Amino acid sequence: NTRVIKKTVDRFAFTGLIKCGECGASITAEVHKGHTYYRCTKKVAACTQRFVREEALIEQINQAILKVFIDNEGKEILTNYLEKQNRQDEQASSSLLPQLQGKLREYDNQIERLIDLYIAKEITQEEYQRKKAKLLNEKKDLQGRVDDIRTNGGGWLEPAKEFVITCNRAGSVAWQGNPSAKRDFLKMLGSNFILKDRNLLFSIRSPFDKVARIGLKENWLPREDSNLGHGGYT
């Protein structure tokens, strides 16, 4: 005795994502005369918030997504810049690593000399323990730097390039009429979504918040002039 279970498709892409900014209740959606409206469920407390049409909500979502949009030209500039920085980092690491390894050997030598002094009873056990602990802690910190260079050298490049690609994709997400894609991007972009006075408010996650603050592509990188330094840009 089998029966077919029909899978229902969620018609309202943004329910379950947004809370009411006045009472904290969930935002629900309903259809009236062919139009979708989002409103507070008013299940927590008395609430004065009014409905907002889906078209108006989507327009706000599109504007939010476009705040982190990097166009194709900006994508190419940033990708080239990141690859250049990675090459410089690799060159710096290749010259720094032998220096750090040499310092590690120096610590080993100092510890051996300290042991000889202790055996020869030229220092007390208390002095020996104190100096040995200091040397071992310093060596451990230095070994951490060496391990970090070996493990993570250049490891930031691909995630950084992927982030630039994601920001570039923001344009197509905002411009095409796919509410589910907009919802997915919005969840990646921010958190704590609330609807208050028909305005969508939320916190932008890092590092998207930095892209949103910069805004204009002209501010992304310093222009080449008489000062070719990095100019304080992060």
Image (spheres, rainbow, N blue to C red):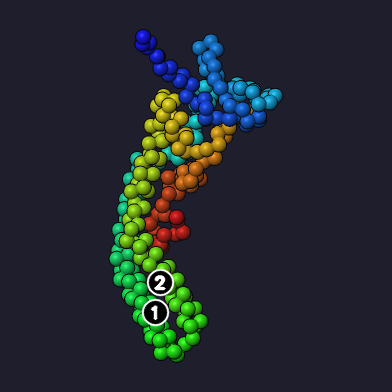
Identify which residue is drawn at 43% across, 49% down: 220
Marks 2 and 1: in contact by CB < 8 Å? yes
Q: State whether residue 28 is above or below residue 101.
A: above
**Disc 2: CA contacts within 10 A as few (<14), some (14-19) or many (>=20):** some
Is 146 drawn above or below residue 214 in the view shown? Answer: below
Report the quarter where the C terminus lies: bottom left
Q: Quadrant of residue 85?
A: bottom left
Q: Disc number at residue 200?
A: none
- Residue at 46% x, 43% y: name it: 208
Task: Tell me what residue is drawn at x 55 percent, y 30 percent.
Answer: 18
The amino acid type of the residue labelled 1 equals Ile
Residue 22, percent across and down?
A: 66, 30
Q: Is residue 52 left or right of residue 92?
A: right
Residue 19 location (% of width, % of height): 58, 30
Kind of residue at disc 2: Lys
Residue 230 appears in the rendering? yes
Specify whether residue 175 is in view: no
In front of the other: 94 or 215: 94
Q: Nearer the viewer, residue 116 or 152?
A: 116
Is tag 1's residue or tag 2's residue first in the polypeptide sequence? 1
Residue, far right: 46
Residue annotated with mark 1: 111
Residue that label 2 marks: 139
User: Where residue 112 sits in the image (x, y, percent)?
Assistant: 36, 81
